[in-house]
Image (spheres, rainbow, N blue to C red):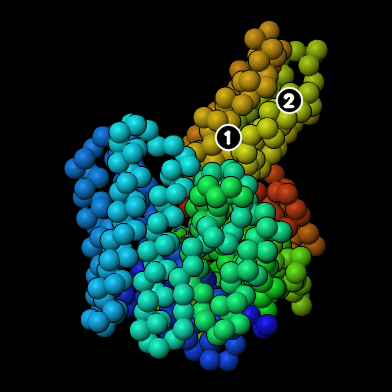
Amino acid sequence: MNLLVMKFGGTSVGTAARMRASAALVAAEAKTRPVLMVVSAMSKVTDLLLDTMKHAEAGDEAGLRHNINELEKRHETACRHLLPEPQQEAVLQSVAGLIAEFERIVHGMRMLGDRPIRSVDEAVAIGERLSALIVAAFLQSEGIAAQAVNGADVIVTDAVFGNASPLMEATTAKASQLLSPLLEAGCIPVVTGFNGATTDGRCTTLGRGGSDFSASILSAALDAAELWIWTDVDGIMTADPRLVPEAKVLAQVTFGEAAELAYNGAKVLHPRTLAPLVEKGIPVWSKNSFAPDKPGTQIVRVLSEAKGARAVTSMRDVALLSLESASAALSGAHVMARALDALARTNIEVLAISGSSYRQSFCFLVRSDDLPRTIEALEAGLTLELAHGYAKPIEVDEQVGLLAVVGEGMRGTQGLAGRIFTAISRERVNIIAIAQGSSELTIAIVVRRDGLEKAVRAVHAECHMAQ
Ligand code: ADP
Ligand code: ASP
Ligand code: MG
């Protein structure tokens, strides 16, 4: 079908003007081939919705009202600026209907004094439903056939609320039932990113930043020819330009490099985005909707020439846990096995692991958000060892950050690791742990959090990434 999937992030639909610009990019491509559009919520709306639910749980009526007003204002203003008067009224009514749906859920939370995770998923997806509604209405007002589609009606997921995974077979079936007929009729489906539903219809979300993942799931389900991910920077860069102003755009990165960057904190892509595409070899581009003529970054299978370290990324909100055997009767490997087994039973992602056979100890890194659950899981998995003093008490260091250096060519570059460590030490930043990451494309380094940004800049300069 030569389908092009175009995904627009929050800033690319953040105001009426940005919606107009993004719709124009879609309309231009739709002249020559079928296009499916995936949209995020307007920028900061997801945070606003989540914050409103916290106010509801705490019984803070004033905070709740304030946020709902803000939500109404953002979307009503967009409608008034985008739509000609005759069409405004119907769309404003639909916007009010969705906001009323949100209010019903949060009032339930206020009564309960609780935020059940399933209700959170249902309520937070309203951000994307609002933006899809408005963008589709705008395209229609321009005489372009378009239809807002709720991702929950297409993407079928497991029941891991807040971080669900797609069930591809069921999703493919729904996509061909619901989306293919629209595409064949020359209509642009404007699908909500971020959300899905279980087989029995309960609302789920795919994790923060999950609209990229929605777009890749739909691309795979519909055998798209290409996926373009539109954001607010010129593509995938050698570092986050907010931390390293001289960071430059990479013309090409491999699927492996992009995945490593995403998993190690580069917000420009949701970590799970690439998995559905790799198998089918669907080409992906990361492009700037604010500067659409710039070439962006192409994500490819192989680079013509793999050169050293190509990009550095970092994560601040992480915690390091250390476990150590306290008795010769218990090997470090045993402690590690027990701990990993306990973690495997939960959905906690281990970001890096490093061990010392001499001390019979090992340490690993998790996201700060996962820390309470991690400790709980470890204590449950090692109850006897801890109670009888075979294992030392679990140590937790929350003042750390993760830095990751990524590049296909790192394997072959002699002395690179040494140069990276020296560059970090020169800044007087303490290196706490080192791991080779899950593949040889990455060196992961845990440093003191207050030195993280300095370390990122030092590594970027040392590896001449901007050249
Ligand atoms: P969107 O809302 O379009 O999905 P995000 O805010 O999720 O956009 O991601 C884009 C942001 O990712 C950029 O503004 C940039 O600050 C950040 N970022 C972090 N690391 C990188 C990197 N290596 N390359 C490009 N952008 C990065
Ligand atoms: N709106 C969601 C979020 O902010 C999903 C996304 O933007 O990708 O996390
Ligand atoms: Mg994003």
Q: Is residue 69 above or below residue 4?
A: above
Asked if the residue at label 2 sits under 8 Å from ligand 2, the reply is no
Q: Nearer the viewer, residue 146 or 281?
A: 146
| Left or right side of 240 for 70 | left
Dot 2 and dot 1 residues touching (CB under 8 Å): no
Which structural element holds mark 1? Answer: strand
* Residue furthest out toward the left: 62
The structure residue drawn at horizontal position 73% and vertical position 65%, both measured from the top left corner, is 278
Q: Kindly indicate the quadrant of the structure image that contains residue 442.
A: bottom right
User: Disc 2 vs disc 1: which is toward the camera?
Assistant: 2
Q: Kindly indicate the quadrant of the structure image that contains residue 349.
A: top right
- Name the residue that disc number 2 marks: 338
- Name the residue that disc number 1 marks: 320
Residue 107 position in % (x across, y down):
30, 41
Disc 1 residue type? Leu
Q: Is residue 28 visible?
A: yes
Q: Nearer the viewer, residue 464 or 171?
A: 171
The structure residue drawn at horizontal position 21% and vertical position 40%, both measured from the top left corner, is 61
Q: Is residue 271 above or below residue 373?
A: below
Residue 437 position in % (x across, y down):
70, 48
